[in-house]
Image: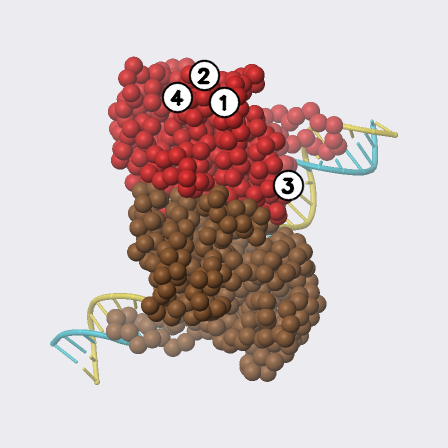
Chain colours: A red, B brown, C yellow, D cyan
Amino acid sequence: MGDEVSDRTVRGSRNEETRRRNLSLVLSAVHAGGELTRSDLTRLSGLNRSTVGALVGDLVSAGLVVEAEPRATHQAGRPSPVVRPSSDVVAVSVNPDVAGVVCAVVGLGGEVRLRETILTPEHLTPEDTALLTKDFLEKVSKEFPSTTRVVGVGVAIPGIVDEQRNTVREAPHLKWRDVPLVSLIEEEVTLPVRMANDATLGVMAESMFGAGAGFDDVVYLNGSVSGLGGGVVSGGHLVKGVRGFGAELGHILINPQGAVCACGRLGCLETEVNIQRIWAVSGEGQVGIDDLDHLYAQRASAALNTELDRQADALAAGIASLLNIFAPARVILGGHVGALFEARSDRIHEGVTAQALAPVGEEASLVRNVLRERMVPIGSAQLAFGPLLADPVNTSLFEWGSRAAVAN
Amino acid sequence: MGDEVSDRTVRGSRNEETRRRNLSLVLSAVHAGGELTRSDLTRLSGLNRSTVGALVGDLVSAGLVVEAEPRATHQAGRPSPVVRPSSDVVAVSVNPDVAGVVCAVVGLGGEVRLRETILTPEHLTPEDTALLTKDFLEKVSKEFPSTTRVVGVGVAIPGIVDEQRNTVREAPHLKWRDVPLVSLIEEEVTLPVRMANDATLGVMAESMFGAGAGFDDVVYLNGSVSGLGGGVVSGGHLVKGVRGFGAELGHILINPQGAVCACGRLGCLETEVNIQRIWAVSGEGQVGIDDLDHLYAQRASAALNTELDRQADALAAGIASLLNIFAPARVILGGHVGALFEARSDRIHEGVTAQALAPVGEEASLVRNVLRERMVPIGSAQLAFGPLLADPVNTSLFEWGSRAAVAN
DNA sequence: TTGGGTTTGTTGTGGGATTCAGCATACCGA
DNA sequence: TCGGTATGCTGAATCCCACAACAAACCCAA
């Protein structure tokens, strides 16, 4: 899933397109697979040994991968050198929230090399975000080798992002609306900036490096303080919809007699499966999402148990609808939905099995997300890596702070 | 959307892959566009004149397209010959229903050349379907020139199809279950047979030749006697899910206090928007889907009006959920849902606008399907044409009745 | 009727990408 | 130490497209 850098005008393939595709295939495989030998790559791609050799050679001279001594194996035959992503190539992840920004540096290959939460005294503004990103870049650039090169910045937004106009269309939790955040950041950091919805990036991360790895059809549901977000990979492709507005899985109807949703209608999944309603009955105040497991594991009050059952039923109903729509191999649950799933696993499984169409239910397994706090950084890094993975040798990399393109 | 003939093992591109892609591009363009000049194809593909000439030449020698005299135009410059799909290349469409089979012959380019409903005295069985298909083939083969070549048979099923095992998993209306229909037909007709859900094929047809042409994101909802089916194209790709089980849009939850659905749960969209409930109040018996427009246009009874309003509201709620999930550019409504939309257009529009997320609602337009009775034939033909469009010169074509492969 | 301008078809050359065969290299096991 | 095996490396052959030059077919205007 190289994020579809499609220029919509369907184009014929020239000869160099073949090369681009093969380089992309190899780099993506190394990115996703971590360490692969050249002979692994040969088998994987179905290309000739000599071709793979040439492709890897190109990627090495571009500084994108490194070849290391063969691993000690106990097979006959000449050992094949190991190809790893270069540790010098990184992406920057930015994830604004109400009280601050989570910034991270992620290496090619998906390793989160550094992750930092920068708090603001007041409610975070878009301008703050741009400035904090700049500060972060200046600071971390000193902590990384001078050979480090950055591919760009990926921004994850808890809200609706217009991927065409590169604006935040609506982020109720942040209280942002029609904010040209990409331009704001690009003015400060002179790096290419891309932006998408956080749950969309979540499913990208999980389906590449997490619980959805190896599956072409994955649904991801994430519960956060700002609501219920979702992302879907169908047939190996991200479901985005026009201008990237799609996959708002929190806003499917569950119960027309339900509570009023922020979106205006009654009984969205988001109003029925909701952390605020947990807080309201828990008697422990605004328990953080990471502490929910602990809360649920304690001997809970009757009120909390009732509420958990109710939310579990609503979640099962929602998942059943999503199964009937997408027939995924995996449904991945994150945030407070993940905690709810952990606490009411049997009840949710039963509800889903009873309500989903039989063939669809049989194929899907429900799992909790595995990447946790690394998910958003990895997802937004994936967004930034997209162009590089799609066209390895023609995508520019940048040194920290300066926009001087490094030779390919 | 050449139907994704992906062999899942990601493969590298060889040089001939380039050729295959370009041939596919040209043939698909001619298939979808009807008549294009060679210079149109040059602009469309971005390839060189000479390359397009060679590609078209290959397709002509394969008998897939024909070049005709240039159209009379009033532009300066040498006239460019017109490229049309060959009228000798056809696909066969088979669509079983309770009381019989609808068979059709569809030419490359999407023209329905012949369409016939074959009724059976009793409830149709899978074996009947295979035999009737054979009879149909034998009969029509005499009505077409001997130069005609068939690419294969596409079967549209009102039910859940296992595209991996090539079986009908569940077709409640037909009362079929786990039927290996593809094998049954292939035993009779010695042609390649492919099968899919009818609504899935509907959205393929509409998004290629109908109301969804030119859009990458399309949701299709079809109401028939057997229930509510759906199909989705997202980002130019068909949403299929694991084994093709997905896109059961009729089975999303609308109202947990609603009626019992055939699938077992309460208040699916299918139970709330439903032709049987129209019949129950219309006082005119089981009005056919094609006669609903007439029924609705008459001065309707109060009961019918109330029911139409109720169904319109339920439909609007369902569409709103689908908009939030897929953010399509178009929502196409067919069958009795199309008639309902026609009768309650304003009410449905208002309901959708009120309930869908604002950005999503602004981008989508609701339209009735345009292909009507040609939709299923075109869709299933598209299924049969898939391999040919994906790899024009290496796909075998067959003469009527015999499996002797015709030279490419 | 003729000639310039314009667009497109056609042909041969050249460069890029892959495959293939043959040989070299590095490991295992006896 | 030697055969077996798997892999890396190199140069020739093949396939595909772009490009340039020329030819063909149309328009328009004189």
- Going by the numbered disc 2, the residue's amino acid type is Gly
- Whether residues under marks 4 and 2 lie with C-beta atoms below 8 angstroms apart, the answer is no
Residue at x-position 41% and y-position 37%: A258
Chain letter, disc 1 residue: A
Q: Nearer the viewer, mark 4 or mark 1?
A: 1
Where does residue A239 sit, x and y in percent of width and height?
Answer: 45, 43
Q: Earlier in the sequence, mark 1 or mark 2?
A: 2
- Going by the numbered disc 3, the residue's amino acid type is Arg
Q: Earlier in the sequence, mark 3 or mark 1?
A: 3
Where does residue A6 sit, x and y in percent of width and height?
Answer: 41, 46
- Whether residues under marks 1 and 2 lie with C-beta atoms below 8 angstroms apart, the answer is yes
Q: Nearer the viewer, mark 4 or mark 2?
A: 2
Disc 1 crowd rating (10 Å Cα; few below 14, some 14-19, many 20+) is some
Helix, strand or loop at mark 4: strand
- Whether residues under marks 4 and 1 lie with C-beta atoms below 8 angstroms apart, the answer is no
| Residue A122 appears in view | yes
- Whether residues under marks 3 and 4 lie with C-beta atoms below 8 angstroms apart, the answer is no
Q: Which residue is mark 4?
A: A102
Q: Which residue is mark 1?
A: A303
- Going by the numbered disc 4, the residue's amino acid type is Val
Q: CA distance from mark 3 to mark 1?
A: 57 Å
Helix, strand or loop at mark 1: helix
Q: CA distance from mark 1 to mark 2?
A: 9 Å
User: Viewer-proximal residue, A176 or A136?
Assistant: A176
Q: Which residue is mark 3?
A: A43
Q: Nearer the viewer, mark 3 or mark 4?
A: 4
| Quadrant hosting residue D25 | bottom left
- Going by the numbered disc 1, the residue's amino acid type is Ala
